[in-house]
Image (cartoon, helix red, strand yellow):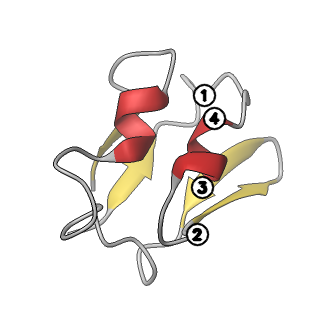
């Protein structure tokens, strides 16, 4: 299962895009989105999901 970004909570800060080890996060339209085909949930790379750990708004990057 991939993660997703709650668009209404996204501040467009871009922190998640630069921290994503699988390059699954891109800016589209007016917010960032996670490509579920590329998202690995940071498994085997980190103990926690990097998008959620760097996001300034709690609960914005969540399991899809």
Q: Does the CB distance between marks 1 and 2 fall below 8 Å?
A: no
Q: Residues within 10 Å of mark 2 (few under 14, many from 20)?
A: some
How many angstroms separate mark 4 from mark 1 (CA)?
11 Å
Answer with the quarter of the image where residue 53 lies: top left
Q: Is residue 46 above or below residue 11?
A: below
- Does 6 appear above or below 55? below
Q: Nearer the viewer, residue 63 or 45?
A: 45
First-in-chain label (4 vs 1): 1
Distance from disc 3 to disc 4, alpha carbons, whole Å, reads 12 Å
Q: Give the Cα distance between marks 3 and 2.
A: 11 Å
Question: Which residue is at the front of the view, 41 or 47?
Answer: 47
Q: Comparing marks 4 and 1, which lies closer to the viewer?
A: 4
| Residue underneath mark 1 | 10
Q: Which residue is mark 4?
A: 15
Residue shown at the point (78%, 57%) measured from the top left: 28
Q: Judge the density around disc 1: few (<14), some (14-19), many (≥20) Cα neighbours within 10 Å.
A: many
Question: How far apart are the alpha carbons under marks 4 and 2?
Answer: 12 Å
Residue at the (29%, 62%) spot, across then down: 42
User: Which residue has dot 2 on it?
Assistant: 23
Q: What number is the disc on residue 33? A: 3
The structure residue drawn at horizontal position 64% and vertical position 50%, both measured from the top left corner, is 17
């Amino acid at each position: 299962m991939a993660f997703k970004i709650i668009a209404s909570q996204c501040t467009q800060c871009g922190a998640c895009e630069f921290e994503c080890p699988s390059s699954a996060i891109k800016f589209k339209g007016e917010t960032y989105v996670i490509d579920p085909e590329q998202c690995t949930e940071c498994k085997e790379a980190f103990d926690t999901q990097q998008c959620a750990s760097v996001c300034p708004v709690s609960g914005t990057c969540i399991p899809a």
